[in-house]
Structure formats: C-alpha cells, structure tokens
Image (cartoon, rainbow, N blue to C red):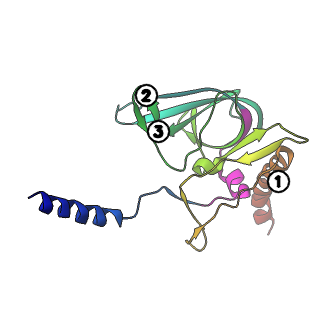
Amino acid sequence: MPIRHAVRTVVLATLLGGLPVGATTMLRADLPQMAQTSDAVVQGVVRRVQSRWSGDKRRIVTDVEIQVTEALKGQPGGTVVVTQPGGRVGDIGQVVGGLASFSEGEEVVVFLEKRGAAAFQLAGMAQGKYQVQRTGPGTMAVPASTGDAVLIDPKTRQETASNAKTVTLEELKASVRAAVQAQQAAPSKKGAK
C-alpha cells in the first residue's frame, strides 16, 4: 500500500508540474495611448495606502490616496483615490499580478481611469504608474514593473516586452502633454476635411 501511494503521488506531481501557471495577461500600452485614453494624469505624493474588505466582503482591495501636485490631464481635484484589487487585511492577503505597488511618501505620475464618482483605477494596471526619483543630476520617471504579467502586443496579439523606458520627469510630462494636445486637435482636423 505505501508503494502504491508513493507512485500515485509521483504521477500526480508529474501531471500537475506540467500545467502552465496562470498569470495576468494584458495588452501592452504605450505612453501616448495611455495619456489619450486616461481620464486623468497626475503627478503627486502617496499619502495613504490602506487595504480593506470590498463591500461584498468577498475580496480585498487597496485604496491609495495621492495628493495631487500637478494635473497633466483632467481636473481630478487636490486628492485622488486609486483603488486596486488585492492587499492584506490582518492575516489574510490577496495578490493580483500585474498591479503596481505604492508606498506612503512615494512621488508618482499616474495614468487614471475613473471608477465611480470619486475613485480611480490605474490605466493599464502597473503600466499606468511611474515613480519619480529625485537622485543624481536630474529627476527621473521610472516605469513600474509589470512583474510576472504577460504583455500582449495590441496589433500582433503576440507576447511582447514592455516598451516603457526610464525618462526624465520633464520628458514624461512633455510626452503626456503632446499626446493630449494631439488628441484635442484630432477632432478639429476631421471636421475640417
């Protein structure tokens, strides 16, 4: 009997070991696209990160409160709340791959999609966050890691790598402003034809 149990265990482990591990899959978003499709783009400082049970008490969500220092798109107000799935409440934690992490005091530029009257979510999950680093000669904007998420090219539908790069904060802001201006100019060009 113990040998039969051992054989079953080995066979089961072998079969399960061959199964692919589930990962978050998302379309790769480029900077101009995120700037144009976002409801708001803001630079700010994370003031609070707090996990809680959702209203139905079935999952954990994390609220990230960001004090806005500059609105690059939209008029979100002086503070925005970004809500993401996952987090830790007491001894229970839920992890969702492909999301950005936040720390109190961290300076960020975030691309936001509206979720209800006063809440937002990140556009493109982790792709919608840049961390502002004020070290060395210049201020840099570093894209958040997408972790183990699988990025898919929106045109070819093939797996691809992120095309987000570390840039200066001013380059990031200029790119966002240019994309927003191009978006605002596009309808007038169509009407002129």
Q: Nearer the viewer, residue 19 or 9?
A: 9
Q: Amino acid at mark 1?
A: Ala
Q: Which residue is mark 3?
A: 86
Residue at image position (19%, 64%) is 7
Q: Is residue 43 magenta?
A: yes
Q: Is residue 62 magenta?
A: no
Q: Which residue is mark 2?
A: 89
Above or below, comparing residue 23 to residue 102 in the picture = below
Residue at mark 3 to residue at mark 1: CA–CA distance: 34 Å
Return the residue found at the far left. 1
Above or below, comparing residue 106 to residue 41 in the picture = above
Return the residue found at the far bottom. 156
Residue at image position (39%, 30%) is 55
Q: Nearer the viewer, residue 95 or 65?
A: 95
Mark 1 Cα-neighbour bin, 10 Å: few <14, some 14–19, many ≥20: some
Residue at image position (62%, 35%) is 102
Question: Regarding mark 3 in the picture, which secondary structure is present there?
Answer: loop
Q: Which residue is mark 1?
A: 178
Percent of width and height locating residue 16? 30, 62
Q: Quadrant of the C terminus?
A: bottom right
Q: Is residue 89 visible?
A: yes
Write the start and end of the magenta stretch as one range. 28-44
Left or right for 76, reference 95 = right
Percent of width and height locating residue 184? 77, 53
Left or right for 190, reference 64 = right
Residue at image position (66%, 47%) is 144
Above or below, comparing residue 58 to residue 113 in the picture = above
Residue at mark 2 to residue at mark 1: CA–CA distance: 41 Å
Q: Amino acid at mark 3?
A: Gly
